[in-house]
Each structure stands twice: as C-alpha cells, then as structure tokens.
Image: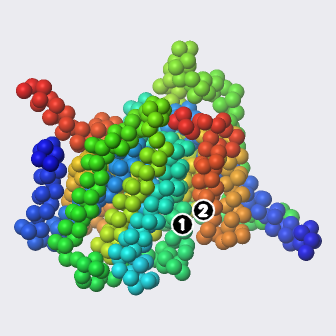
Amino acid sequence: MGALLRSRRGAVVFFGLAALTPIVVRDAYFLDSLVLILLWGALSAAWNVAGGYAGQVSIGHASFFGIGAYSAALMVTRFGRGPWLGLLVGVVLSIGAGLIIGFLSNRLKGPYFALSTIAFSQVLLIGVSRWRGFTAGGEGIPVPFRPGFATLGLGHAGWVYMALSVALVCYAVEVYLERSRVGYQLAGVREDEDAAEALGIPTRKLKVGAVALSAALTSVCGSLWAQYVGFVDPTYVFSVDLSVRFALNAIIGGMGTALGPFLGSLLITSLETYLRATFAGVKAGFTGIYLIIYGTALILVVRFVPDGLAGIASRIRWMRRAHA
Amino acid sequence: MDPAARLGPAQISVLAQLVVSTVLLGGIYALISVGLTLIFGIMRVVNFAHGEFLMLGMYLAFWAFLVFTADPYFVVFVAIPLFFVVGLVVYALVMRGVIHASHNVQIFTTVGLSTVLQNVALVAWSGDFRFVRPWHLSTVLRAGATTFNLSQVVASLIAAALTLALVAFMKWTHAGRVMRATAQDRDAATLMGIDTDRVYRLTFAIGIAAVGAAGVLVAPLYAVYPTAGLQFVLLSYVVVVLGGLGDMLGALIGSLIVAAVEVAGSYFFGVAWKEIFYFILFILVLVFRPAGLFGQRGAETLGV
C-alpha cells in the first residue's frame, strides 16, 4: 500500500487537495468549479476505460451520460422515487446499451466504431426528444431540489465529497486496469488484437466488458450531474459536443493513464471558468470563443503531444532519472 | 381486401410523389456525400468536419444573397473554386501533418476542426436561424399528379450533374487515375513516381469543393445556422457506409436509399421521426454489412 501511494504521488496530491478544499474554502463559486472539475474528470476517466485502456474510441459516450441523467430525473419527477434508485436503473440500462455498442465494437474498428457510437447517441437523442409524453421532449425536465442525502440535495461541500467519491471510484478502476492481469490483457488487445487472440486472450469478451464498465461509470456521473445541475434536456445530454468533451479531457491529460483525465479536466474546466468570467459581458460570444480554443487545443495536442500532460510529466521524470 | 384493389389512382399519385421526392432529395444527398467518400477512399481519413464545410457553403449563399442579391444557383459556380482553395489551405494547415498518423489522431483532428469551424461561425454570425428566399422557392411545378418546387428541382439537377462530373473525372482523366491508383496501393503508387502528397492535397480540395457547392445548393431549402452541418453529415455517414466507404457509385445508390427511407418514413410516421429510421438502418448496416451493401467483406476489420 505504501509503495502504491508513493508511486501515485500526483494522485495523492490531487485528490488530497480536493478533499481539503471544502474545509478551508467557503466560496461557492470556487467550490462549484471544483465539483465540475471532479465530475468532468470522473467522466473522462470513465471514457478512458473504453477509449484509453481498451482502445475502443467512442464519440457517443453522451448516450450513457444521458441515460443516467434521464433515469435519475425521471425517477424523481415521474415516479416520485429517490434519485438513487434512478441512478441504479441508469446503470442497468447503460450496461445494456454498453453491451450493444460493445457487440458492435467486435465487428468494427477505428472510424467505423466511432461512427456507430455517434449514430447510437443520435438515435437516443431523437427518441427522447420525440417521446414527449414520457420524457417531456425537447423542453427538458427541471429536477426539484429537496435537501437531504437520500434525495441528493446536498450543499456545496457535500457535492465536493460526492464528486470526489465518484472520481476516486473511476480512478481506482483505472489503476486496477493498469496493474491487474485483465488490464495487461486489455493492453494486449489494444496494441495488437490478432496477437492477443493468438495468445488465448478472450479479446471479444474483454472489449465488450470494458465498454459496458465504462458505460456504467459514465451513467453514474450522468445521474449525479442531473441532480447537481437540476435540469436535463436531450439536446445537451446526448450531444456530440459532450461526447467530444469526455474524450478531450482524457486526450489532453493523457489517454490510457489513470490521472490524465483528471489533469485534463483540471486544465479545461479551469480554462472554461476563467473564460466565463472574462467574457461574461459577451453573451453569445463566450461559448463560441471557449469552444474555438478547445477545438484548437484538441488539434494541436493530438498532433504534437499525443500522450498528453501525463506523457510530458513522465518524460520529464525519465530525463531527470537519466541525468541523475 | 385484395391488395390490388386498394391501389387506386389516389395511391398511385401518392407513390409518384414519394418517388419524385426521393429522387430530388437523393441527388442533393449524393453531392454532400460524394466528397466524404472520395476523401475517405483515397486518404483513408473520415472527415468529421465535413458537415462544417457544408455549413460554410450555406452561409456563403446566405451572405451572397443578402449583400448582392445573388441567386444561390449562380453562387454555386463561385463556390466551387473558392472551396477548392479553402480545401487546399485546410489540407496544408491541418490534414497534412496527420495523414500518416493513427486513426485516433485523425478522428480527433477532424473533430477538433469541426468544433473550431462551428464556433467561428457562431462568433462571427451568431446562432440565429437565417433563411435564403430566392424567387424560385415559391414557384411550384406540376407534372401529372405530382408537385415540387423549382428550387428543389434545380438544386437536384445541378447536384446530380456535379456528382456525375466528379465520377467521370475519377474514371477517365489522368488525375483521376492517379488518385485511384494511390487509393489502391499507396506504396506502389509512390514507386511509380506518383507524388502522394499532391494526390492527397488535390483529393481533399475536390472533396471540400463538392461539399461547399452542396451547401450553397441546399441553402434555400433549409435554415442556415452554425450547427446546420450536423444533420447532413450524419446522413452522409449513413450514405457512405451504405454504399461502401470510398465507393462513389455506391454513394449515389446509398443517397437514393437514404432519401427513400426518409421520404417514406416522414410520409407514414410523420416528419419528426424521419431521422430515426436512417440511423436504425445505419446501425443495421454496420452490424450486418459493415463494408456496405455492395462492398467487399472484411474491409471494416482491416481498419482501412
């Protein structure tokens, strides 16, 4: 355990600081940013399970996020039950959806798989937008705020710890995939599927499993997000932009590394918060300018630093060790 | 009741109308998709920013109409060289560096490009829905029991002509042969003295010119806004996968199939549901015939 913590110094510092912040800081704006950094980080870590570790690059992960968000919101507003039950239903549905997409991943590679995931999220977007009687369609659903843990009506500090818990779960899953036998097998599948298959690794099962696990984690974050933000609408929760965002944090931070998605989220979410404050006066301009920077960053990072921030960090460490 | 008895004159005219609408829509979809399939076939890159060039074409038509009251069907002939140059510039700045990179790098490069272009449009021209309303939009043509408007007919005709011209270019010109040779075997083409970088540059520019022209042509028929490209690009993925990625004639047939599904779907189930049918069709094709309806089996798992 001690050795594990020492080798994960970055993560200990990151999550430790996040845990201490609500004790020291009371500023609502700051704590809100922290919740979002952790939640977006957790979502990207969930994406990373499929995209980074298993090599199943999806641009339709918003499907699972939306399933989670809608399950929680509808459970509260339509059935009068707690959001936790909705969260659970969302996980079950997302695993089902993940198995379907995972099945596709056995037949399709590279751009074909990415295309099929986009199509899947679009089918859900259209379905939810048009099924007005049940989902309220394009208008979206306001989620009522009821204080208490059972109804997920938490204060700022409460939300920080909630987001932190989910972030730690996602992080733990990633660490498991780095250190376990299953993780090595997945790496084998990602790097050379035919070779992995020849070695007797159950490549199909592993890929489907990774996508389903990633879907379940994404769904949990989606449910929490719905309760935190208090509003769900189909054009946002199923959007391609959102799917890209999950991937973006992971790519900027470092695909296939455990802490990478959180570093990416820290950078991107802080940038967003900063720009929102800077361009507060320019109404329509803000989102546009922010997204132009975000798109440009994506193009530059995949081209010049394909292993992301985590990759830069490990290269610096490597060079230091070489000099010592 | 006997099924033949149900097919009275009223049903036949509905059928005729549906067929005419399918052909008109299919012609436009073909021009949108042919650039995507060309770029994929030769460069092995799925251009996720394809819809954004369509959107830019729509804005070109809008501004030309607003400022110079220029008819979109004349603007299209300006758009072709203009978007050809845009394609050259984007290739040099963005695509050239990733042409030999992995699929993931290529996917996210074009996804990033798509985000940038959408938001440049948002910042420059706001998110308002804009409309281009030339005179021919309100001119209705009648032929037998079918009716359609002049804009749609002209747009389809020009689109079909441009698509066929492109197919002919690929088949019969020297440049087209060189491009196809590069698609078949990049290394062998290089050994034969073909400058593949030049081929890719030309391919990308032609693909963008085609989709830019398509954008100008569809501008009078649909609202113009920064994310207008999305609905069309999703549709052209369906077309291109149906026809087999990289297969231009396949794209033509794929366009007609998608148009038929859309027209029949909106007639029988309502306009609101039309998209869901071609996405379901898309997923079914991906599952059962991933290389396209006429494509070779196995192309999708080679990762080409």
Image quarter where the C terminus of chain A lies is top left
Give amino acid for label 1: Ile
Q: Residue at x 32, y 58 (%)?
A: A43
Instruction: Calculate the distance from the C-alpha at mark 1 to the C-alpha at mark 2.
Output: 8 Å
Question: Toward which corner of the image does residue A225 lie, by quadrant?
Answer: bottom left
| Residue B216 or residue A44, whichever sits in front | A44
| Residue A11 or residue A213, whichever sits in front | A213
Q: Where in the figure is residue B58, as x and y percent of width and height?
A: 53, 55
Residue A41 visible in this rendered orientation of the protein: yes
| Residue A104 or residue A41, whichever sits in front | A104
- The number of numbered discs placed on residues in the rendered structure image is 2
Label 2: chain letter:
B
Residue under label 2: B275
What label sits on residue B36 in the rendered view?
Answer: none
Q: Residue at x 28, y 79 (%)?
A: A150
Above or below: residue A257 compared with residue B193? below
Label 1: chain letter:
A
Q: Residue at x 38, y 41 (%)?
A: A186
Residue under label 1: A126
Is B51 on the left-hand or right-hand side of A39?
right
- Asked if labels 2 and 1 touch by Cβ distance under 8 angstroms, the answer is yes
Residue B70 visible in this rendered orientation of the protein: no
Is B238 on the left-hand or right-hand side of B115?
right
Q: Which residue is drawn at 29% across and 56% down?
A: A170
Secondary structure under tag 2 reads: helix
Secondary structure under tag 1 reads: helix
Q: How crowded is mark 2: few (under 14 residues within 10 Å), some or many (20 or more)?
A: many
Q: How is the image coloured?
A: rainbow
Above or below: residue A290 compared with residue B53? below
Q: Where in the figure is residue A295, as x and y percent of width and height?
A: 35, 49
